[in-house]
Image (cartoon, rainbow, N blue to C red):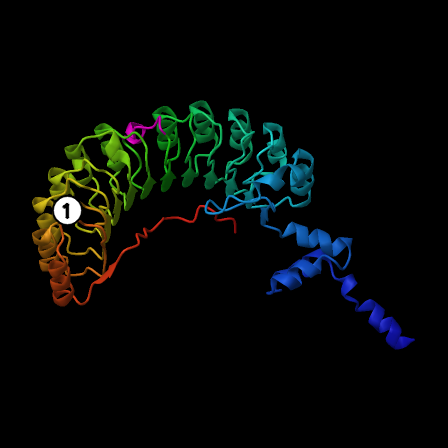
Amino acid sequence: MKNASYDKHTSIMHLDDDCLAIIFQFICHSSDRESFGLTCHRWLNIQNRFRRSLQFQCSFSLQNLSSLSQTKLLVNSYHLNRLLFRFQNLEHLSLSGCTELPDSGLAQLQFYGSELHSLHLDCCFGITDNGLSLVAISCSSLVIISLYRCNITDMGLETLANGCSALKLINLSYCPFVSDVGLRALSQGCPQLQALKMSCCREITGAGLRGCSPTLTFVDAESCKLKPEGIMGIVSGGGLEYLNVSGAGWWIHGGEFSPIGKGFASRLKILNIRMCRTVGDESIVIIASGCPLLQEWNLAVCHEVRMPGWESIGLNCNKLEKLHVNRCRNLCDRGLQALSNGCKRLLVLYMSQCSRLSPNAVELFKLRRGDVEIKEEEVMYIGPDWRLIG
């Protein structure tokens, strides 16, 4: 009896919640942490208290858009409300793929969104400016937001910027109703902005970023309708390290890429101007001499780059490690020799379907630059992990 009494008084169930919380925090394996809450309701509540990340089964990565057909069955406002009530200390929430979720589904964020650091609403087609208003009111600590393919407008972005001034990473890719007005609101209202994706936003010229913060280091503006003043706006902060303006050459002329190399982008390390068919030697020479820290440069399908451009790259790009020249019609034997004579740190040359190159010139390059690997496929650094949820 004495031993039984002793065991009773030393039972783990007599530990207070703070002690149990400390025990939970020291559990390393995820399977053990998940099993913790199966013991009893009290232990389940402790487990819920420490839940920091929530992602629905229908959520997807931007590289895998499957599971959208399951969305209607798996997620609605009722389910979301119950889960937000259960996990009240979330820091990362992904609702990506919840295509039918309405603005009202975000209402519970008013009570449980104050600690959210990242919110992913990719392909939430039912979320409009009204939903963004709820986010702005409720999530003042938000650092990351992804609105890929959302039907939001400049008005919603203005509201977001006013309420979430701590934002650092913003994804607006494929948002058809966003323009430079919304971009300007984000640039001015979010002084800590570091990364911005706005690819395929056809109403954006880039001018909305004029005077942006020097904290802005990453911009993806692929297939936007950029203008020369827009390119100047994008680099105006002076802190840019990654820039993707591939496909922009459809709307601007060859010499109008030169603002990239005129002093504001001197910290640039990765530049993608793929498929900018009109970019010419004038811009290439200025960029090569004005961006001394370039480590990777994609010039694939840049047909107007000729001898002055290749010579300037070889002469000035002393830190270049990767160069893409696939399908450059005017890369000739002399141009390849100019690259061989310079670019002393070059490690990889992506080169295929360059019709003016002779086999002899390619073999000579390989002999002279055995330290350089020649590849056909084009792989570019993609910057921050926009699917970050924990």
Q: Give how far across and how far down residue 234 sits, in percent.
A: 27, 35
Q: Is residue 368 above or below residue 162?
A: below
Q: Position of residue 68 (x, y in %)?
A: 57, 40
> Residue 242, how many percent across, how many down?
29, 46
Residue 191 as seen in the image, left or right of residue 3: left
Q: Nearer the viewer, residue 2 or 266?
A: 266
Q: Is residue 133 left or right of residue 74?
A: left
Could you tell me if residue 193 is visible in this image? no
Q: Hey, which quadrant is residue 216 in on the image? A: top left
* Total marks placed: 1
Q: Which residues are magenta?
A: 202-210
What secondary structure prevails in the magenta region?
A: loop
Q: Which residue is mark 1?
A: 288
| Quarter where residue 171 is shown | top left
Magenta highlight on residue 378: no
Question: Which amino acid, mark 1?
Answer: Ala
Percent coordinates x, y for residue 174 in the rendering: 42, 33
- The quadrant in which the N terminus is found is bottom right
